[in-house]
Protein backbone atom coordinates (compact mmCIF):
# COMPACT_ATOMS: atom_id res chain seq x y z
CA UNK A 1 0.00 0.00 0.00
CA UNK A 2 1.56 3.37 -1.00
CA UNK A 3 2.13 5.53 2.09
CA UNK A 4 0.34 8.39 0.30
CA UNK A 5 -3.03 6.68 0.79
CA UNK A 6 -3.93 7.18 4.43
CA UNK A 7 -6.25 4.76 6.27
CA UNK A 8 -9.13 7.23 5.92
CA UNK A 9 -8.84 7.21 2.13
CA UNK A 10 -8.38 3.45 2.06
CA UNK A 11 -11.70 3.05 3.87
CA UNK A 12 -13.36 5.51 1.50
CA UNK A 13 -12.21 3.49 -1.52
CA UNK A 14 -13.63 0.31 -0.06
CA UNK A 15 -16.97 1.88 0.84
CA UNK A 16 -17.35 3.69 -2.50
CA UNK A 17 -16.62 0.59 -4.57
CA UNK A 18 -18.17 -2.05 -2.33
CA UNK A 19 -14.89 -3.95 -2.36
CA UNK A 20 -13.43 -5.80 0.62
CA UNK A 21 -9.83 -5.21 -0.48
CA UNK A 22 -7.75 -3.57 -3.20
CA UNK A 23 -4.17 -3.32 -4.40
CA UNK A 24 -2.31 -0.64 -6.34
CA UNK A 25 -1.29 -2.11 -9.68
CA UNK A 26 0.05 1.00 -11.40
CA UNK A 27 1.10 4.58 -10.83
CA UNK A 28 -0.59 6.01 -13.92
CA UNK A 29 0.86 9.49 -13.52
CA UNK A 30 2.63 11.80 -11.12
CA UNK A 31 0.63 15.01 -11.00
CA UNK A 32 2.23 18.14 -12.43
CA UNK A 33 4.61 19.94 -10.05
CA UNK A 34 4.37 17.27 -7.34
CA UNK A 35 0.74 17.69 -6.28
CA UNK A 36 -0.03 13.98 -6.00
CA UNK A 37 -0.58 10.86 -8.05
CA UNK A 38 -3.06 9.03 -10.24
CA UNK A 39 -3.20 5.35 -9.31
CA UNK A 40 -4.87 2.32 -10.86
CA UNK A 41 -6.33 -0.09 -8.29
CA UNK A 42 -7.43 -3.68 -8.65
CA UNK A 43 -10.40 -4.58 -6.48
CA UNK A 44 -11.37 -8.03 -5.32
CA UNK A 45 -13.16 -9.68 -8.21
CA UNK A 46 -10.51 -8.25 -10.56
CA UNK A 47 -12.41 -5.07 -11.44
CA UNK A 48 -10.39 -1.85 -11.54
CA UNK A 49 -10.79 1.82 -10.65
CA UNK A 50 -8.58 4.87 -10.93
CA UNK A 51 -7.99 7.24 -8.03
CA UNK A 52 -6.66 10.77 -8.26
CA UNK A 53 -4.96 11.64 -4.97
CA UNK A 54 -4.25 15.36 -4.62
CA UNK A 55 -2.05 16.83 -1.92
CA UNK A 56 -3.21 20.43 -1.62
CA UNK A 57 -0.36 21.43 0.70
CA UNK A 58 2.33 20.16 -1.65
CA UNK A 59 5.44 22.24 -2.22
CA UNK A 60 5.43 23.07 -5.91
CA UNK A 61 8.36 21.90 -8.03
CA UNK A 62 7.59 23.16 -11.51
CA UNK A 63 9.77 21.60 -14.24
CA UNK A 64 10.22 24.99 -15.90
CA UNK A 65 10.82 26.92 -12.70
CA UNK A 66 7.43 28.64 -12.31
CA UNK A 67 7.25 28.07 -8.54
CA UNK A 68 5.64 31.30 -7.31
CA UNK A 69 2.77 31.57 -4.86
CA UNK A 70 0.57 32.70 -7.75
CA UNK A 71 1.33 29.46 -9.56
CA UNK A 72 0.63 27.47 -6.40
CA UNK A 73 -2.72 29.18 -5.79
CA UNK A 74 -3.74 28.60 -9.41
CA UNK A 75 -2.99 24.91 -9.02
CA UNK A 76 -4.94 24.67 -5.77
CA UNK A 77 -7.97 26.25 -7.39
CA UNK A 78 -7.66 23.95 -10.39
CA UNK A 79 -8.10 20.87 -8.20
CA UNK A 80 -11.03 22.47 -6.40
CA UNK A 81 -12.60 23.17 -9.80
CA UNK A 82 -12.03 19.59 -10.97
CA UNK A 83 -13.69 18.28 -7.82
CA UNK A 84 -16.66 20.61 -8.40
CA UNK A 85 -16.85 19.47 -12.02
CA UNK A 86 -17.15 15.81 -11.10
CA UNK A 87 -19.53 16.43 -8.19
CA UNK A 88 -21.88 18.97 -9.80
CA UNK A 89 -21.52 18.91 -13.59
CA UNK A 90 -20.21 15.59 -14.90
CA UNK A 91 -23.62 13.90 -14.79
CA UNK A 92 -24.66 16.19 -17.67
CA UNK A 93 -22.26 14.44 -20.04
CA UNK A 94 -23.66 11.68 -22.22
CA UNK A 95 -22.42 9.04 -24.68
CA UNK A 96 -21.21 11.68 -27.15
CA UNK A 97 -19.18 13.44 -24.45
CA UNK A 98 -17.82 10.40 -22.65
CA UNK A 99 -15.88 11.00 -19.43
CA UNK A 100 -15.03 8.75 -16.45
CA UNK A 101 -17.85 8.25 -13.98
CA UNK A 102 -17.26 9.59 -10.48
CA UNK A 103 -17.57 6.68 -8.05
CA UNK A 104 -16.61 8.52 -4.88
CA UNK A 105 -15.00 11.64 -3.49
CA UNK A 106 -13.53 12.73 -0.16
CA UNK A 107 -11.48 15.47 1.51
CA UNK A 108 -9.23 14.78 4.47
CA UNK A 109 -6.40 16.72 6.12
CA UNK A 110 -5.97 19.09 3.18
CA UNK A 111 -5.99 16.30 0.60
CA UNK A 112 -8.55 15.30 -2.03
CA UNK A 113 -9.43 11.85 -3.31
CA UNK A 114 -11.39 11.28 -6.52
CA UNK A 115 -12.42 7.68 -7.22
CA UNK A 116 -13.12 7.30 -10.93
CA UNK A 117 -14.13 4.71 -13.47
CA UNK A 118 -11.13 3.09 -15.15
CA UNK A 119 -11.55 4.06 -18.79
CA UNK A 120 -9.01 1.45 -19.87
CA UNK A 121 -11.28 -1.25 -18.50
CA UNK A 122 -14.34 0.40 -20.05
CA UNK A 123 -13.11 0.19 -23.63
CA UNK A 124 -10.80 3.18 -23.96
CA UNK A 125 -7.31 1.69 -23.48
CA UNK A 126 -5.39 3.57 -26.18
CA UNK A 127 -3.38 6.78 -25.95
CA UNK A 128 -2.08 8.51 -29.05
CA UNK A 129 0.95 10.70 -29.69
CA UNK A 130 1.25 14.01 -31.57
CA UNK A 131 2.16 13.96 -35.26
CA UNK A 132 1.25 10.27 -35.55
CA UNK A 133 -2.49 10.47 -34.86
CA UNK A 134 -4.88 8.87 -37.37
CA UNK A 135 -7.31 11.32 -38.93
CA UNK A 136 -10.31 9.33 -37.67
CA UNK A 137 -9.06 9.71 -34.09
CA UNK A 138 -8.62 13.48 -34.54
CA UNK A 139 -12.14 13.66 -35.95
CA UNK A 140 -13.48 11.76 -32.94
CA UNK A 141 -11.93 14.33 -30.60
CA UNK A 142 -13.27 17.23 -32.63
CA UNK A 143 -16.76 15.73 -32.48
CA UNK A 144 -16.35 15.28 -28.72
CA UNK A 145 -15.45 18.96 -28.34
CA UNK A 146 -18.30 20.14 -30.56
CA UNK A 147 -20.84 18.06 -28.66
CA UNK A 148 -19.40 19.19 -25.32
CA UNK A 149 -19.66 22.86 -26.29
CA UNK A 150 -23.18 22.40 -27.63
CA UNK A 151 -24.27 20.68 -24.41
CA UNK A 152 -23.24 23.59 -22.19
CA UNK A 153 -24.01 26.57 -24.41
CA UNK A 154 -24.98 29.62 -22.36
CA UNK A 155 -24.64 28.08 -18.90
CA UNK A 156 -23.21 29.96 -15.94
CA UNK A 157 -19.97 28.23 -14.83
CA UNK A 158 -20.95 27.93 -11.16
CA UNK A 159 -18.14 26.47 -9.00
CA UNK A 160 -15.89 26.33 -12.08
CA UNK A 161 -13.42 28.85 -13.53
CA UNK A 162 -15.27 31.97 -14.62
CA UNK A 163 -12.92 31.93 -17.61
CA UNK A 164 -11.77 28.43 -18.50
CA UNK A 165 -8.37 27.27 -19.88
CA UNK A 166 -5.11 27.16 -17.98
CA UNK A 167 -3.62 30.01 -19.99
CA UNK A 168 -6.25 32.73 -19.56
CA UNK A 169 -4.70 36.11 -19.06
CA UNK A 170 -5.98 36.95 -15.58
CA UNK A 171 -4.01 34.03 -14.12
CA UNK A 172 -0.84 34.41 -16.21
CA UNK A 173 0.63 37.81 -15.29
CA UNK A 174 4.10 36.31 -14.72
CA UNK A 175 4.24 34.75 -18.17
CA UNK A 176 2.97 37.99 -19.73
CA UNK A 177 5.71 39.94 -17.95
CA UNK A 178 8.30 37.51 -19.37
CA UNK A 179 6.97 37.80 -22.93
CA UNK A 180 9.60 39.37 -25.15
CA UNK A 181 7.23 40.02 -28.06
CA UNK A 182 6.18 43.60 -27.27
CA UNK A 183 3.51 43.86 -29.95
CA UNK A 184 1.86 40.67 -28.74
CA UNK A 185 2.22 41.75 -25.11
CA UNK A 186 0.46 45.03 -25.89
CA UNK A 187 -2.33 43.20 -27.72
CA UNK A 188 -2.87 40.60 -24.98
CA UNK A 189 -5.64 42.44 -23.04
CA UNK A 190 -7.53 43.10 -26.28
CA UNK A 191 -7.29 39.45 -27.37
CA UNK A 192 -8.59 38.37 -23.98
CA UNK A 193 -11.41 40.91 -24.06
CA UNK A 194 -12.54 39.84 -27.54
CA UNK A 195 -12.81 36.20 -26.45
CA UNK A 196 -14.45 36.82 -23.08
CA UNK A 197 -16.99 39.26 -24.51
CA UNK A 198 -18.14 36.99 -27.34
CA UNK A 199 -21.92 36.84 -27.49
CA UNK A 200 -21.95 33.05 -27.43
CA UNK A 201 -20.26 31.39 -24.45
CA UNK A 202 -20.17 27.80 -23.31
CA UNK A 203 -18.09 25.60 -21.02
CA UNK A 204 -14.64 24.82 -22.35
CA UNK A 205 -12.64 21.79 -21.28
CA UNK A 206 -9.67 24.08 -20.72
CA UNK A 207 -6.85 21.60 -21.38
CA UNK A 208 -8.10 19.72 -24.43
CA UNK A 209 -4.77 18.42 -25.65
CA UNK A 210 -4.40 15.05 -27.33
CA UNK A 211 -2.90 13.54 -24.15
CA UNK A 212 -6.18 14.14 -22.30
CA UNK A 213 -8.20 11.92 -24.63
CA UNK A 214 -8.51 8.15 -24.23
CA UNK A 215 -9.35 6.09 -27.31
CA UNK A 216 -11.02 2.82 -28.11
CA UNK A 217 -8.84 0.23 -29.84
CA UNK A 218 -10.31 1.28 -33.19
CA UNK A 219 -9.63 4.94 -32.46
CA UNK A 220 -13.18 5.84 -33.48
CA UNK A 221 -14.53 6.35 -29.95
CA UNK A 222 -13.06 8.71 -27.40
CA UNK A 223 -13.40 9.84 -23.79
CA UNK A 224 -11.85 12.90 -22.13
CA UNK A 225 -10.13 13.33 -18.77
CA UNK A 226 -8.49 16.10 -16.69
CA UNK A 227 -11.04 18.81 -15.91
CA UNK A 228 -8.90 21.11 -13.76
CA UNK A 229 -9.42 24.10 -16.04
CA UNK A 230 -13.01 23.68 -17.16
CA UNK A 231 -14.94 26.94 -17.16
CA UNK A 232 -16.67 29.57 -19.24
CA UNK A 233 -15.44 30.59 -22.66
CA UNK A 234 -15.58 30.51 -26.43
CA UNK A 235 -15.35 26.99 -27.85
CA UNK A 236 -12.62 28.07 -30.28
CA UNK A 237 -10.15 28.15 -27.40
CA UNK A 238 -10.48 24.38 -27.00
CA UNK A 239 -10.46 23.68 -30.73
CA UNK A 240 -7.39 25.78 -31.56
CA UNK A 241 -5.48 24.31 -28.63
CA UNK A 242 -6.44 20.75 -29.56
CA UNK A 243 -5.44 21.08 -33.22
CA UNK A 244 -2.12 22.59 -32.16
CA UNK A 245 -1.52 19.64 -29.82
CA UNK A 246 -1.80 16.89 -32.42
CA UNK A 247 -0.63 18.28 -35.76
CA UNK A 248 2.77 19.47 -36.88
CA UNK A 249 3.27 22.84 -38.52
CA UNK A 250 3.09 21.52 -42.08
CA UNK A 251 -0.33 20.00 -41.37
CA UNK A 252 -2.00 23.04 -39.78
CA UNK A 253 -2.91 24.87 -42.96
CA UNK A 254 -3.64 21.70 -44.93
CA UNK A 255 -6.16 20.37 -42.41
CA UNK A 256 -7.38 23.48 -40.61
CA UNK A 257 -10.42 24.30 -42.77
CA UNK A 258 -11.41 20.65 -43.01
CA UNK A 259 -11.42 20.26 -39.23
CA UNK A 260 -13.18 23.58 -38.67
CA UNK A 261 -15.93 22.53 -41.09
CA UNK A 262 -16.36 19.22 -39.31
CA UNK A 263 -16.52 20.91 -35.91
CA UNK A 264 -19.26 23.29 -36.99
CA UNK A 265 -21.31 20.58 -38.74
CA UNK A 266 -21.37 18.61 -35.48
CA UNK A 267 -21.94 21.67 -33.29
CA UNK A 268 -24.80 23.02 -35.42
CA UNK A 269 -26.46 19.61 -35.70
CA UNK A 270 -26.41 19.13 -31.92
CA UNK A 271 -27.71 22.64 -31.22
CA UNK A 272 -30.47 22.32 -33.85
CA UNK A 273 -31.72 19.14 -32.20
CA UNK A 274 -31.26 19.96 -28.52
CA UNK A 275 -31.34 23.77 -28.29
CA UNK A 276 -34.09 25.13 -30.56
CA UNK A 277 -33.86 28.42 -28.66
CA UNK A 278 -30.42 29.09 -30.20
CA UNK A 279 -29.35 30.07 -33.71
CA UNK A 280 -26.52 27.68 -34.64
CA UNK A 281 -25.52 29.66 -37.72
CA UNK A 282 -25.07 32.82 -35.65
CA UNK A 283 -22.78 30.89 -33.32
CA UNK A 284 -20.80 29.50 -36.26
CA UNK A 285 -20.42 32.93 -37.86
CA UNK A 286 -19.09 34.48 -34.66
CA UNK A 287 -16.82 31.62 -33.64
CA UNK A 288 -15.22 31.09 -37.06
CA UNK A 289 -13.94 34.64 -36.88
CA UNK A 290 -12.64 34.02 -33.36
CA UNK A 291 -10.62 30.91 -34.20
CA UNK A 292 -7.42 32.82 -35.15
CA UNK A 293 -7.90 35.06 -32.10
CA UNK A 294 -8.07 31.99 -29.86
CA UNK A 295 -4.93 30.56 -31.50
CA UNK A 296 -3.09 33.85 -30.94
CA UNK A 297 -4.27 34.07 -27.33
CA UNK A 298 -2.73 30.68 -26.52
CA UNK A 299 0.42 31.60 -28.44
CA UNK A 300 0.71 34.71 -26.23
CA UNK A 301 0.90 32.45 -23.19
CA UNK A 302 3.26 29.96 -24.82
CA UNK A 303 5.85 32.54 -25.91
CA UNK A 304 6.04 33.94 -22.39
CA UNK A 305 6.00 30.58 -20.62
CA UNK A 306 8.46 28.67 -22.82
CA UNK A 307 10.02 30.64 -25.71
CA UNK A 308 11.85 27.53 -26.96
CA UNK A 309 8.74 25.30 -27.03
CA UNK A 310 8.28 23.09 -30.11
CA UNK A 311 4.97 24.81 -30.86
CA UNK A 312 6.77 28.12 -31.50
CA UNK A 313 6.79 28.03 -35.28
CA UNK A 314 6.43 30.11 -38.43
CA UNK A 315 2.74 29.31 -38.91
CA UNK A 316 1.82 30.59 -35.46
CA UNK A 317 4.09 33.60 -35.87
CA UNK A 318 2.46 34.51 -39.18
CA UNK A 319 -1.07 34.05 -37.86
CA UNK A 320 -0.25 36.05 -34.73
CA UNK A 321 1.16 38.93 -36.77
CA UNK A 322 -2.01 38.99 -38.89
CA UNK A 323 -4.31 38.99 -35.86
CA UNK A 324 -2.32 41.64 -33.98
CA UNK A 325 -2.21 43.86 -37.07
CA UNK A 326 -6.00 43.58 -37.43
CA UNK A 327 -6.43 45.05 -33.94
CA UNK A 328 -4.60 48.26 -34.77
Image (tube, rainbow, N blue to C red):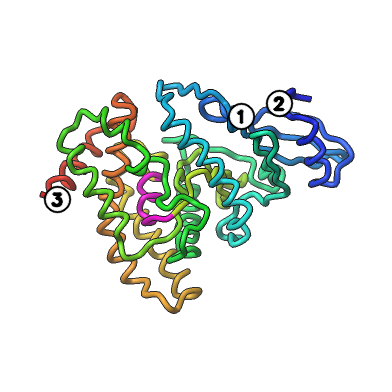
Q: CA distance from mark 2 to mark 1?
A: 8 Å
Nearer-the-camera pick, 271 or 129: 271
Question: Which of marks 1 and 3 precedes in the sequence?
Answer: 1
Q: Kindly indicate whether the residue at mark 1 contacts the one at mark 2 (C-beta within 8 angstroms).
A: yes
Q: Which labelled disc corresponds to residue 36? A: 1
Tell me if 176 is positioned left or right of 70 in this view. Answer: left
Nearer-the-camera pick, 86 or 286: 86
Q: Kindly indicate whether the residue at mark 1 contacts the one at mark 3 (C-beta within 8 angstroms).
A: no
Question: Which of marks 1 and 2 precedes in the sequence?
Answer: 2
Whether residue 106 can be seen here: yes
Say which residue label 3 marks: 327
Where's residue 160, x and y in %?
50, 52
Look at discs 3 and 1 and give the one toward the viewer.
Answer: 1
Q: Give the quarter of the image for residue 2.
A: top right
Whether residue 213 can be seen here: no
Task: Report the residue at 50% width, 47% height from top.
Answer: 137
Q: CA distance from mark 3 to mark 2?
A: 51 Å
Amino acid sequence: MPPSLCPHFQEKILSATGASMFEVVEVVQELWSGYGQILRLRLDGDSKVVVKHIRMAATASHPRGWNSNLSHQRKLKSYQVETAWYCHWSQNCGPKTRIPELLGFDRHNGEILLILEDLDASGFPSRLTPNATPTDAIRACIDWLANFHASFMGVEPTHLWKTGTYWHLATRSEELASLGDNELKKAAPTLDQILTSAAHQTLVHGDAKLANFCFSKSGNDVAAVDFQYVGGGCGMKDLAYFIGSCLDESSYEKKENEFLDQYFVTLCRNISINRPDLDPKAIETEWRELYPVAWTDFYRFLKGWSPDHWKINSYSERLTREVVASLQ
